[in-house]
Amino acid sequence: MIFGQVVIGPPGSGKTTYCKAMQEFMKGLGRNVEIINMDPGNDSLPYKCIVDVSDLITVNDAMSYMKLGPNGGLVYCMEYLEKNIDWLIDQIKHLPDKHFVLFDCPGQIEFYTHHQSINNIFQTLTKSKRISLCAVYLVDSHYCTDPCQFISVLIASLGAMLRIELPHINVLSKVDIIEKQASLLFNLDFFTEVLDLKKLLDYVPSDPFIAKYKKLNNCLAGMIEDYSLVSFLALHVEDRYSMLRVMKAADKACGYLFGSEDERTIDKLFSHAMAAEFDYEKIASLQEKYVCNSTKPISEDDL
């Protein structure tokens, strides 16, 4: 059995950076891990990949021969890969059991909201019964600084969970620069645990265009909150603890139970640490390191 993460998310969310960092992190723990580039428009890879979809088709080829624009060319490439899925299966069928694979996917959001090719590709792979996958959905954490954008992120994350049809975890990436443009209204755990969203709606701008959708935003927030549909893990790729937390969540989602002796020792230490933590303490170190403390974020007690 081969195990893997399908790394998805909107453009600029850090998917390629995540794949490179996670590969190095896993290799440091003694794992056999490879990367597969699923983006035919990514012609500048910072890592060595075992399979590159650009060897089959590129966006430039699709644009040139089919007279398409960049987005249409990428859609054509994914549909072409779907029709030629045997090519991808042949590329990975030689991998030995217990190998781990990271699929670096394209960033066009339509692939995770309403287009079917990405879902069909990975459903075909999982039905081969030799590969077990989970989806890791990355979102740039700076969206937490804007109430409307964060609600949009929640809906997009939920749409991806339903469309991709794989065990799924959501990740707020680049948490080290989360307040580069604006301060958080609440502590970081408010956004990772997706707590009382209706309190967040109190900070929606009073612009008439936005205000007329207040009832819709209230309904969406209530649905997500009532059913605990979406939550996030915070990630900074240079923070080993946050990388370990995301890796273990993905391992659990895809059913990976193996590892080197060093990794099993880390697992025991990590499990004991997790058992002793409260919800806020899980991300307290990230809060202290990367969220500005000069202006105290609004807590629930302040409301």
Image (cartoon, rainbow, N blue to C red):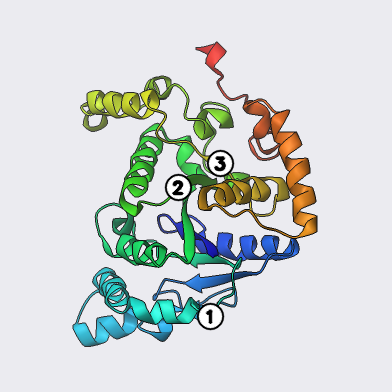
Q: Is residue 115 left or right of residue 198?
A: left
Label 2 packing within 10 angstroms: few (<14), some (14-19), many (20+)? many
Tag 1 or tag 2, which sits nearer the N-term?
Answer: 1
Q: Residues within 10 Å of mark 3 (few under 14, many from 20)?
A: many
Q: Can the viewer see residue 255 in this picture? A: yes
Amino acid at dot 1:
His
Q: Quadrant of the N terminus?
A: bottom right
Label 1, secondary structure: give it: loop
When asked about the image quadrant of residue 224, the answer is top left
Q: What's the distance in space between the residues labelled 2 and 1, CA to CA?
A: 26 Å
> Which label belongs to residue 94?
1
Q: Is residue 105 left or right of residue 18?
A: left
Q: Residue at x 66, y 33 (%)?
A: 282
- Where is residue 227 shown, x and y percent of the image? 37, 27
Indicate the position of residue 192 as horizontal and vertical percent values: 53, 34
Q: Residue at x 57, y 63 (%)?
A: 19
23 over 166 or under it: above or below: below
> Residue 6, can we see it?
no
Compute the Cα span from label 1 to label 3.
Answer: 33 Å
Amino acid at circle 2: His
Q: Quadrant of residue 30?
A: bottom right
**What amino acid is labelled 3 in the image?**
Leu
Q: Which mark is residue 233?
A: 3
Measuring from the top left, give residue 104's x and y in whole percent: 48, 66
Measuring 59% from the left and 55% from the top, which residue is drawn there? 256
Image location of residue 199, percent across then percent down: 42, 19
Comparing labels 2 and 3, the label whose residue is closer to the camera: 2
Q: Are marks 1 and 3 in contact (CB under 8 Å)?
A: no
Which is more N-terminal, label 3 or label 2? 2
Numbered badge on residue 168: 2
